[in-house]
Every structure is written in structure tokens, then in C-alpha cells.
Image (tube, rainbow, N blue to C red):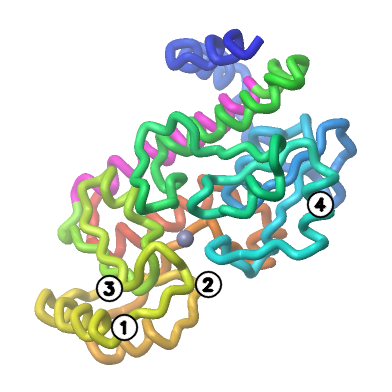
Amino acid sequence: MKENFRKILSVGAIAALTLMFTAGCAKEPQSQQGTAQASYAIKTAEADYVAYSLAEQVLKDIAEIKMIIPPGSQPHGFEPLPKDIAEIEKAQFLFYINDRLEPWAKKLGGDKAFPLERNLPEVDPADPHVWMDFDNIQVMAENMAYYISSQYPDTEKQLLKNILNFHNEVDMVKRIYGQMLSNCEHKDIYHIGHLAFGYIAKRYGLNFKPLTGAKADAEPTPKDMAEMIKSIKENKVKYIFTEETLNPAISQAIARETGAQILYLHTIEHVTKQEFEQKMTYRQLMLKNLDSLAKGLNCKA
Ligand SMILES: [Zn+2]
């Protein structure tokens, strides 16, 4: 059965089924109505918002989902509380990104902890933000479906439908990124934040210059700040980027010092309560990011 599912999800089959599926289904996939989830026999837990939003789409009409890291918190340095451990105990599957980002998941979840980073086409061991590559997120969605279908073969048909919907959305976003980012006046992303956008920059030949390292909560050194300010001034950079969930004091100080304006990029790993309640999707958040990138780098479609 495992091999069968992999076979169904081969690239050629997906392309053919995508055509079949989109021909018969022009409407947007319906979001779940109301806040209460339907009750399903399969119970899953998702470590962070990347895994959770993926489960919203891939496990639609299949499984219950529950995010462990609460809205307003980010995965770097997260330590589960007893209530989180109780949630994991209730679930049959714990989906997480990788051991670099969430080292607690395997320890607590044991055999039911499933990393979504498996067989990804693009992995930098120093950068855990693998979902910022479009090919990676599509394989991560397939991995999630594969883990479920290998234990619940009856879910295959619905999983395939959900995967095709998700792939269509990501393909669309990928096309728009390709069009927008192929013609930009600037290539340098001066980011007052952490290493979250390296994959997307690499894919489109942009230079990602984060102020801090791989962890969202790392403090920049005065030397790092001084060097960035010098470079922004020397290159007459008009727009700098930051993350909405970070303390704005540093980006505001750099903006004041250099005269540059601030634009926001979304990591997806860290959502506000409002974004969580709005069920913001990968597609929506990545398109918001594209708006900022296109403005800040002066790209023309
Ligand atoms: Zn991060």
C-alpha cells in the first residue's frame, strides 16, 4: 500500500490528475465552517503553524488537528508544557518540521512523531526553514499524506484530492513568484530578522542578508547592526524588511538611522492569534511576502 501511494503521487500522475481535478472543480476548496472541528477517528497533533496549516489542507475531511505551539509563540527554543504533552499523548500522529527546529518532538512523540522534512529536494543543514522552498513544501504535503495513508489506506482517495488542491495552489504561487521576481531592480534583501527566507532568496537568485542567525530570538550584536547600517547607507537602500512578530525597536532604529522604509515578511512558523483564527494559508502568506518583496526590490511583472 505504501508503494502504491507513492506511485499514485508520482510527478506524471499528479500532473494528469491535476488537470482532471481542476477541470471538474473550478471553485476554491471550502474552508471548514465555524470553529468546532468535526470529529474524526484519526487524531493528529501539529508542532507549529507550518505543519498545522498544511494539515488544514492535506488532512481536510480526514483527521482532527491540533497545534501544539500556541499562536503568538515561535518554534525556536519552544519548550512543551504538561498540557502540550497531554495533547501529544491523545494524538496518533505528531507532525513536525525537523529535529533542528523542534528537537523536543521526537523525544516526546516517539514512534508517532513524523518529520515532514524527508526526501526534500532542497535542504541546507544550517537553515531549518525548509518550507520556504515551493518544491519542498509540496513534498512535505506528500509526506504528511503518506504517513496517514500507510496506516489508514481508506483515506487515500480523499488524501489525493486534498494533495492535488494544495499542489495547484502552490504551483500558482510559484508561477507568480517566477514572473514577479525575474525582473527586479534590486537583488539584496536587507532583513532585520533571522535566517527564515534563505530558501526563497536562493530559488530566485536574490541575496538574503539577515541581521541575526538561524534562531528567531537571537540578539544582533552592535557590530552586526553597525555593518548593516553602513551597507544600507552606502547602497542607498530604500526598503528594509523585518518580521511582524519581532520586537520593532531594532528595525525602527535602523530605519531612522538610514531613512529606509520598513516592509514585512511572514515566516509562517509564527502566527498571531488573529492569523490563526483566520486560518491563513501557505498560499495567502506567501503572496503577502511577494507583495513586500516586489515593492522592496522594485520588481516589474
Ligand atoms: Zn525561524
Q: Which residue is tagged 4?
A: 87
Query: In what element is the residue under mark 1?
Result: loop
Mark 4 and 2 residues: CB-CB less than 8 Å, in contact? no
Seen from the viewer's position, the closer of residues 45 and 271 is 45
Q: Is mark 3 within 8 Å of ligand 1?
A: no
- Residue 92 lies in quadrant: top right
Label located before the other in sequence (3 or 1): 1
Question: What's the mark number on residue 92?
Answer: none
Q: CA distance from mark 4 to mark 1?
A: 38 Å
User: The residue under label 4 is which amino acid type?
Assistant: Glu
In this view, the mark in front (3 or 1): 1
Q: CA distance from mark 3 to mark 2?
A: 18 Å
For image coordinates 87% across by 39% down, the residue present is 38
Question: What's the mark number on residue 239?
Answer: 3
Label located before the other in sequence (4 or 1): 4
Q: Is residue 6 above or below residue 179?
A: above
Residue 247 among those drawn in magenta: no
User: The residue under label 3 is which amino acid type?
Assistant: Tyr
Q: Is residue 286 above or below residue 76?
A: above
Q: CA distance from mark 4 to mark 2?
A: 26 Å
User: The residue under label 2 is which amino acid type?
Assistant: Thr
Category of crowding for the residue at label 2, using alpha-carbon neighbours closer than 10 angstroms: few (below 14), some (14–19), many (at least 20): some
For image coordinates 63% across by 61% down, the residue present is 275
Question: What's the mark number on residue 245?
Answer: 2
Q: Which residue is tagged 1?
A: 221
Residue 177 locus on image (x, y percent): 34, 44
